[in-house]
Amino acid sequence: MSLAGRHILQASQFDRSDLDQIFAVADQLRPVALRTETVDVLRGAVLANLFFEPSTRTRVSFGAAFARLGGTVLDTTGLQSTSMAKGESLYDTARVVAGYVDVIVLRSPEAGAVEEFARGTQIPVINAGDGPREHPTQALLDVYTIRDERRRNGRDLDGLRITIVGDLKYGRTVHSLMHLLRLYRDVQVTLIAEDSLRMPDEVVQQARAGGVRVVESATFEEGLRDADVVYMTRIQEERFKTPADFSRARGKYRLTRPLFERLCSPSAVIMHPLPRDSRVESRELDDDLTTHPRLAIFRQTDNGVPVRMALFALVLGCEAHLPESRRPARWYRPAAFGPHDAPMLPTEPMRFER
Ligand code: ASP
């Protein structure tokens, strides 16, 4: 089924052909995300980027994706600055905003709120995180990144062994990721969490019903040995009832460079949806891994832009016009985004035209 006009609410709504299509369009858009080319298929279109919970990367990533397709982004952050603080219903807000823009991205602290919001409008609504429940676009960029990392070794997602560690109860990115992993063959997921933060049963059951082998009992060390991908997560402080509960839960599983190098296979990669908690009491992913070539976390964030561009192009039904709108970018860009990155592709020197 075409994605045009559809809401993007949860990862389980996608089938394998949706993912293949999103990733094919994202591949096509990579030169735009890398700033060697421009496209303007969304010139004149407007996005409402509504974030009612803290966010940096997801909000900017959606905004950058829309802007790089030629569209205009209107941002609202924080519930207090909206009419919902005056008691307006989600339905009313949705209907009102739909009269102003072409697509809405919404993050809410409440599970299920994005669905309720979507009922108030016919324009596409994209879930950018609803409380502890789901974060479907993060899962898309995670799977896109795994696909990328494995392709370097001539493999695809089939046969993947992934170890997911940390806050599996409140971590919405891993709930969505579990749903997408069902779309591939021969996948094994090893879950490592302390008892109070285990993956919700219904997510595990759905994954098993979809053919994923889920192992829940491994120790951290065993789980690391097996993995092609180690997916670390932050303990979600904001979801705990008391600071004491959070303090008890954090710092249990910490991936450091010596541990990674001693236990993991030389082809294993490390992922994390970010932000990582760098406070000494938490530090699930040590800073000593920052320069490690197998740390894929910044490749993950970079991939958010082409994946979200692809989603906007498909949801707004303009992907067929992408090839004709491609133009070379004319401004300066560095050879890589960060100090430890490999040079970006394509690698030809920039030509400045005046
Ligand atoms: N950025 C991710 C999210 O919004 C992960 C996190 O916050 O830990 O769910």
Image (cartoon, helix red, strand yellow):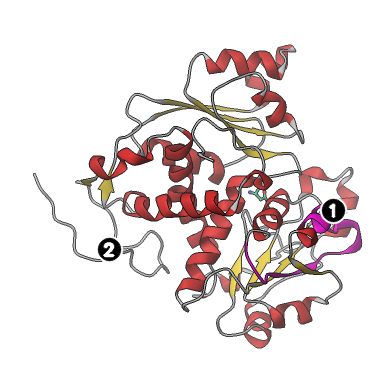
Separation of residues labelled 2 and 1 (CA atoms): 43 Å
The total number of labels drawn is: 2
Q: Secondary structure at mark 2?
A: loop
The amino acid on which the numbered mark 1 sits, given as a three-letter code, is: Pro
Q: Residue 225, image x and y in percent?
A: 71, 83
Picture quadrant of residue 185: bottom right
Q: Nearer the viewer, residue 51 or 187?
A: 187
The amino acid on which the numbered mark 2 sits, given as a three-letter code, is: Pro
| Callout 2: CB less than 8 Å from ligand 1 | no
Q: Quadrant of the N terminus?
A: top right
- Is residue 309 in view? yes
The residue singled out by tag 1 in the image is 200
Q: Residue furthest bottom?
A: 262
The residue at 10%/48% (across/down) is 353
Q: Is residue 58 above or below residue 96?
A: below
Q: Residue 340, image x and y in percent?
A: 42, 69
Task: Look at the image and give the residue range highlighted in magenta.
Answer: 184-206
